[in-house]
Image (tube, rainbow, N blue to C red):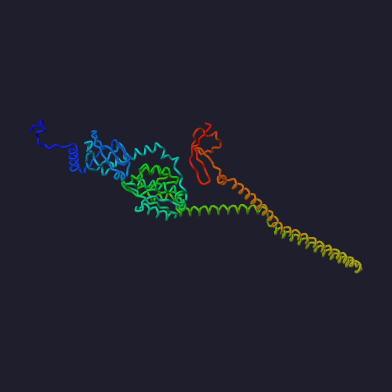
């Protein structure tokens, strides 16, 4: 056949459009399902939402690819240049440019190694920004009144957390169900964190949780990828509410674990971290109660010993001894009196003295002596009554003085306690004042202590915040 004379040939003549369409049809029929592995290059996301990219191999061979908007919205990870992927699609052409490409219907990262590499690169970038620093982590409340849980309503993680909370320390639960894997999961998780933090603005009837638990049960690396997405990491970092990350099993690690205020190895462990054990608390309270009781008992014993110092020891014995002594003297006196009378009677009888004269004298003397004896008895009795009255009432007087002394000490203590309470740290903060401390946890009391930009913590009555202070004069 003479190809030099095309006018004499019977070969069909094509227009450019016809040839382009024919080639397009041939490619689409023969390559309608293609599995292709390559490295993403020249990634572009158009304003329409369509994704344009090229796939290249080790030999730097390129083939253009297109991901239409609907399919692009279902990708559960972020596409990046240099990422090795496996795509499924069909080969087609763009007729106006005589250029063939692959229309991508499915895309996934090529292998677990590539996923780990992606996660590690993302971790380094976020760490460089400071999102994982300890200084930004918030302390957990000791006993939160309400706990927010962000997880799937169809997984076992929620049930595990609820069971553990009921056993340890039952509190209010705010459950925000989200998808934890697949397309759109990362967006739902981050939005849930933001919405709960904005509850005071969105809904004033719902109590804002004191603590959030964000997580899910175990799964493959691909299943846990939602918690490695940048949007989730940033949402956790920006949360004003402390967050416990509880993703997967103990061996699983995600970027949410690095940025969260506390990382729990499992959802069950998250509940144990969030709440103290009520049984342990009761034991601690009982132990403190015993210590307080022992302290009070010891103070009572000490005060009793001090009180006994002001009492007269065995004052009844002293009175009894005095009474016995007086009885002895009285017996001796009576004996002497009788002896004296008998002695003079004998003398009168022996000397034959007239009875009436000496006897009358003796009688008079005896009457005088008897009167003096009665007077002496009366004096001693009065003396004993006075001494006895003093000994009986002395402890009462001392006791009243001791009570007055104790009451004066209690009044002074109460006044001191009221004065201390009025000038306490928390009361001053409650009046609207604030305490500013630097990074070394020392108070900043003068503006001259602020040089250029100083990182500080501002303590209010109901909490504290981090801040950067600037001195305008610097």
Quadrant of the rendered image containing residue 134 = top left
Q: Nearer the viewer, residue 237 or 407?
A: 237
Residue occupying the far left of the picture: 1
Q: Position of residue 429 (x, y in %)?
A: 55, 45
Q: Residue 436, relative to residue 350: is it above or below?
A: above
Residue at 75 percent across and 58 percent down: it is: 387
| Residue placed most toward the observer, 383 or 36 | 36
Q: Is residue 439 visible?
A: no
Q: Quadrant of the N terminus?
A: top left
Residue 11 makes an appearance in the image? yes
Q: Nearer the viewer, residue 395 or 122?
A: 122
Task: Name the residue rendered at 23%, 36% in the picture.
Answer: 97
- Percent position (x, y) of residue 312? 69, 55
Find the residue positioned furthest to the front: 7
Residue 163 lies, in percent from the top left, at 39, 55
Residue 372: image quadrant is: bottom right
Say whether residue 288 is left or right of residue 248: right
466 is higher (above) or lower (below) than 283: above
Left or right of 224, for residue 343: right
Q: Is residue 38 left or right of residue 370?
A: left
Image spot of residue 91 (x, y percent): 22, 41
Count the marks. 0
- Indicate left or right for 336 with 226 as reference: right
């Amino acid at each position: 056949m003479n190809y030099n004379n095309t006018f004499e040939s019977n070969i069909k003549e094509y227009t450019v459009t016809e040839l382009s369409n024919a080639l397009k049809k041939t490619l689409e029929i023969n390559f309608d399902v293609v599995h292709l592995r390559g490295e993403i290059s020249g990634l572009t996301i158009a304003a329409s939402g369509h994704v344009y990219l090229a796939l290249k191999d080790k030999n730097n061979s390129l083939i253009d690819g297109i991901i239409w908007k609907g399919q692009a919205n279902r990708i559960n990870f972020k596409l990046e240049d240099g990422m090795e992927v496996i795509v499924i699609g069909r080969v087609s052409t763009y007729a106006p440019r005589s250029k063939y490409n692959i229309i991508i219907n499915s895309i996934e990262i090529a292998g677990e190694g590539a996923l780990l590499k992606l996660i590690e690169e993302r971790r380094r970038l976020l760490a460089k920004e400071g999102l994982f620093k300890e200084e930004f982590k918030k302390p957990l409340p000791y006993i939160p009144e309400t706990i927010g849980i962000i997880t799937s309503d169809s997984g076992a993680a929620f049930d595990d957390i609820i069971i553990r909370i009921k056993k340890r320390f039952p509190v209010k639960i705010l459950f925000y169900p989200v998808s934890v894997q697949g397309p759109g999961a990362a967006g739902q998780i981050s939005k849930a964190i933001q919405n709960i933090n904005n509850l005071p603005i969105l809904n004033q009837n719902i109590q804002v949780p004191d603590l959030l638990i964000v997580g899910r049960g175990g799964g493959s690396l691909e299943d846990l990828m939602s918690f490695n997405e940048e949007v989730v990491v940033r949402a956790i970092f920006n949360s004003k509410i402390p967050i416990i990350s509880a993703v997967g099993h103990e061996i699983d690690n995600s970027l949410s674990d690095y940025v969260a205020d506390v990382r729990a190895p499992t959802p069950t462990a998250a509940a144990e971290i969030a709440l103290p054990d009520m049984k342990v608390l009761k034991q601690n309270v009982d132990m403190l109660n015993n210590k307080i009781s022992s302290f009070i008992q010891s103070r009572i014993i000490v005060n009793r010993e001090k009180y006994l110092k002001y009492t007269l020891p065995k004052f009844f014995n002293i009175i009894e001894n005095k009474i016995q002594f007086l009885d002895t003297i009285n017996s001796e006196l009576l004996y002497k009196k009788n002896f004296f009378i008998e002695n003079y009677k004998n003398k009168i009888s022996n000397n034959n003295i007239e009875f009436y004269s000496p006897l009358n004298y003796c009688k008079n003397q005896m009457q005088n002596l008897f009167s003096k004896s009665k007077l002496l008895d009366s004096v001693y009795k009065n003396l004993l009554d006075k001494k006895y009255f003093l000994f009986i009432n002395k402890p009462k007087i001392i006791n009243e003085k001791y009570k007055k002394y104790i009451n004066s000490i209690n009044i002074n203590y109460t006044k001191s306690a009221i004065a201390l309470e009025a000038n306490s740290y928390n009361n001053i903060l409650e009046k609207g004042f604030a305490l500013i401390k630097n990074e070394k946890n020392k108070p900043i009391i003068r503006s001259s202590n602020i040089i250029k930009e100083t990182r500080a913590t501002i303590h209010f009555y109901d909490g504290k915040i981090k801040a950067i202070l600037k001195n305008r004069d610097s």
